[in-house]
Image (cartoon, helix red, strand yellow):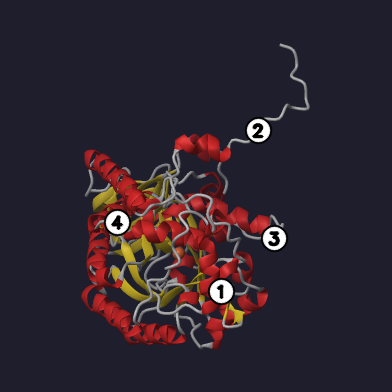
Amino acid sequence: MATCSLLVRNATVVTMDPERRVIDPGYVAIDGDRIVGVGLDDWCPYDEADIVIDGTGKAVLPGFVNAHTHSTDLLLRGGLCDDRALYDWLTNVVDPGCRAYRPEDVRTAVELYALEALRSGITTVVDSVEAPLDDWDETAETVIGVYTRAGLRTVYAVMFYDAIAPEHLAQVAACDQRPPADRTDFGALMDLDRALAGIERIMDRHHGSADGRISVWPSPGVAIFCSDAAFAGAQALARRRGVMTTVHVCESPVDAHQGGRTGVGHLAAIGYLAPDVLAGHCVQISMDDVAILARTGTRVATNPVSNMFLGNGIAPVSDMLAAGISVGIGTDDANCNGTVNLLADLKLAALAQKARTKDAGAITAEEVLELATIGGAEAIGMAHEIGSLEPGKKADLAVLDLTASHLFPRHSVASVLVYQALGTEVETVVIDGRVVLRDRQVPWLDRDAERALAARAQEASVRAAALGRLPPRTDDLWRSRTVRPVRPSPHPTPPP
Ligand code: FE
């Protein structure tokens, strides 16, 4: 018999390995930061471990990969952003709101984000962070500091913008017509050389830190706000450092075209699309665009809840999968989603494809679960290390409690996780072999500190909304905003 550092026994083990084995009852053995054994519980060769987790009534999954997200904007949720289209939301809420942050608000946002992410079973995030160029170093220090403490595996993607074509400037300016309507200054456009030097500085300082859990990628933020030189420069830097780049592309009808072509067609024509590109969104795209993404090996991060929240549409994910494109799934901003809960988003991801295609068989629960695990790992180029429970891989996993009544009856664990789970079932999370969430609590925040964090977030959000002159949205305005006249029912009320 053998010993290891962490052992989960007697659980439903959803491996996401090449055979997609579900082992029940099974075990997962970890030693140090690696998985050393996965198999039937009866055949478990380990009889001793520093930490033993009884998996009775629980499922063990690879930790979820949040392939596209923005942690720092989280303080702008709660009703400040509802009912606005992408560029209205971006120019009238996100930009002024984030500019009104104090430096310490960034830490508050990311702490709240990390807590919520871990509680939904997320172990890896691709966090595209936007900040004024002068604040890049401090912002990176703060955000990466929180992630390092929380133990999350992180791609810190540094977003920048260097150019906006006149036709897009007019389109975006038109989005400013909603109050407060005095913001046509979108696009803190940056000097390209300074931006690339800034990204390289952040790479030098942080890439590979926290035992390799932190990666730094360049991100030409939004395709229509970046010059051809920006894509070339970002890609050259990324390739020199052995990382990927990520971009927002064809997210809404406003940015579906660029340079007289489709957005995807434009990025292909300038030679940018390649297997080391993670294209965020790809909502407003044609089947020709799907073929281009497949041909170039470009990977995609879909964000179904954000896309529906902002009225952008539904990405053709089932067509992308059929074309062989590597697709992961993200929660995007918490303020155009509501939460940082990838598990809760899976149901909507599935239903969106069924509704879009009017085909109930367009996508299966198993395929949706793949988006959040091995698919996400492939999409961000890390499938050799994470995304499945296999010996030799990094020990990143989530243990979910499946004993609640809403999870019964149960025949297929994938179906139950996608369609019945509420997103609150995650009990324990392990990253790099370290327990980073136990009984839904993180070691860096007790219950009192969590209440204080929530209060700090509320105070910071109220202040940022006032300073940024965000459109007020409070419950006091409910009546004037949404109450429609009551019409008499055509059906008479039956007598009592
Ligand atoms: Fe985004």
In what quadrant of the picture does the N terminus appear?
bottom left
Task: Name the foreground residue: 29 vs 483.
Answer: 483
> Which amino acid type is shown beneath numbered disc 2?
Pro
> What is the C-alpha distance between the residues marked 4 and 3?
42 Å
Measured from the top left, where is residue 125 in percent x and y? 37, 63
> What is the C-alpha distance between the residues marked 3 and 1?
18 Å
Q: Can see residue 303?
A: no
- 432 left or right of 481 in image: left
- Residue with the mark numbered 2: 485
> Residue at 46% of width from left, 86% of height from top?
228
- Residue with the mark numbered 3: 357
Label 2 Cα crowd, 10 Å radius (few <14 / some 14-19 / many 20+): few
Q: Nearer the viewer, mark 1 or mark 4?
A: 4
- In the picture, residue 459 is in which quadrant? top left
Q: In the picture shown, does residue 454 fall above or below 292? A: above
Name of the residue lying farthest toward the front = 182
Q: Can see residue 470?
A: yes
- 450 left or right of 490 in image: left
Q: In the picture shown, does residue 154 fall above or below 409? A: below
Is disc 2 placed on a helix, strand or loop? loop
Q: Nearer the viewer, mark 1 or mark 2?
A: 2
- Residue with the mark numbered 4: 101
Is disc 3 placed on a helix, strand or loop? helix
Label 4 Cα crowd, 10 Å radius (few <14 / some 14-19 / many 20+): many
For marks 2 and 3, the one nearer the N-term is 3
In what quadrant of the picture does the C terminus appear?
top right
- CB contact under 8 Å: marks 3 and 1: no
